[in-house]
Image (cartoon, rainbow, N blue to C red):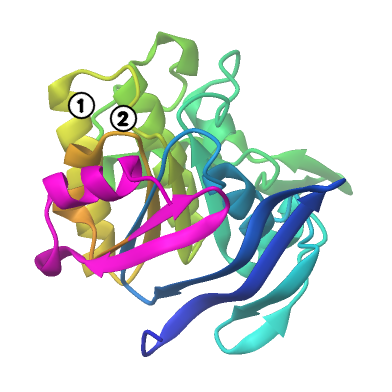
Amino acid sequence: MVDNSLVRMEGITKLFGRVAALRDVDFEVARGEVVGLVGDNGAGKSTLIKILSGVYPPSAGKLFWQGSEVRLKSPRAAMRLGVETIHQTGALVEGMDVKRNVFLGRELTKSFLGLRLLDLHRMGKEALQVVSGIGLRLRSADVEVSTLSGGQRQSVAIASAIYHKQELLILDEPTNNMSVRESRKILEMTRNLRDEGISSILISHNLNDVYPVSDRIYVLRNGKVLGVWRQEETSVDALCEAVMSEE
């Protein structure tokens, strides 16, 4: 087991009828650690992450957060705990501007004549400050998300998680359909967050993305953990062979 664990999953099994999507999976992320999660389609990656983010309850097994057992009944419960899932698509509302996306579901308000109103000025100021802090230069927080590139959208989603002091980011295929330059920026951001003590789970089919930034890498196959390796103890070729191997 990893010392100083932030989240630990023990013996996680998930059944859909008679089909086992996960079978007795142990998974752990330490504070300030980037963990890669790889495997072929149908390996169980998405199911594992949905359990961790409160979408599915496990059929069996236990989930621990900072050493205490927890039961996540909803994605909002996971967010309250400190878990933020950032999808390659769907993480933001395209018809809204940057400030509203940064504070989506957690809007800042102010009192006016006994009423609670959105504090759009403060939201804009603080949204622009947090996105600037991770290197995203925007002329205004009023910019609509639909006008941003894929990498910029990911940056806005990550900025929102940072602002709300989330401790674990789940990055689900974060570099899909991105340019090489934008992919490098997102991966560099992941490394920088690790240095600030924020943990990440990086899920990707691209082992060349996962390998350089991960401290440890889990390989799932047919709903089970095939193996877990420290980055310095393996290689992209070895991981590729593990992903493609037959049981």
Say which residue appears at 35% left-offset and 20% top-offset.
Answer: 150
Q: Which mark is residue 132?
A: none
Say which residue appears at 47% left-offset and 62% top-offset.
Answer: 225
Which amino acid is tagged 2? Answer: Thr
Q: Residues within 10 Å of mark 2 (few under 14, many from 20)?
A: many
Q: Residues within 10 Å of mark 1 (few under 14, many from 20)?
A: some
User: Bounds of the magenta span?
Assistant: 218-247
Numbered disc 2: secondary structure = loop
Say which residue appears at 32% left-offset and 72% top-offset.
Answer: 32
Q: Are marks 1 and 2 in contact (CB under 8 Å)?
A: yes
Could you say where residue 172 lies in the image, as x and y percent from the top left? 46, 39
Q: CA distance from mark 1 to mark 2?
A: 8 Å
Q: Is residue 155 above or below residue 68?
A: above
Task: Assign the N terminus to one quadrant of the image.
Answer: bottom left
Asked whether 163 or 184 is in front, the reply is: 184
Tell me the residue that label 1 is attached to. Answer: 182
Tell me the residue that label 2 is attached to. Answer: 175
> In the displayed structure, does residue 192 sit left or right of residue 225?
left
> In the displayed structure, does residue 239 sit left or right of residue 126?
left
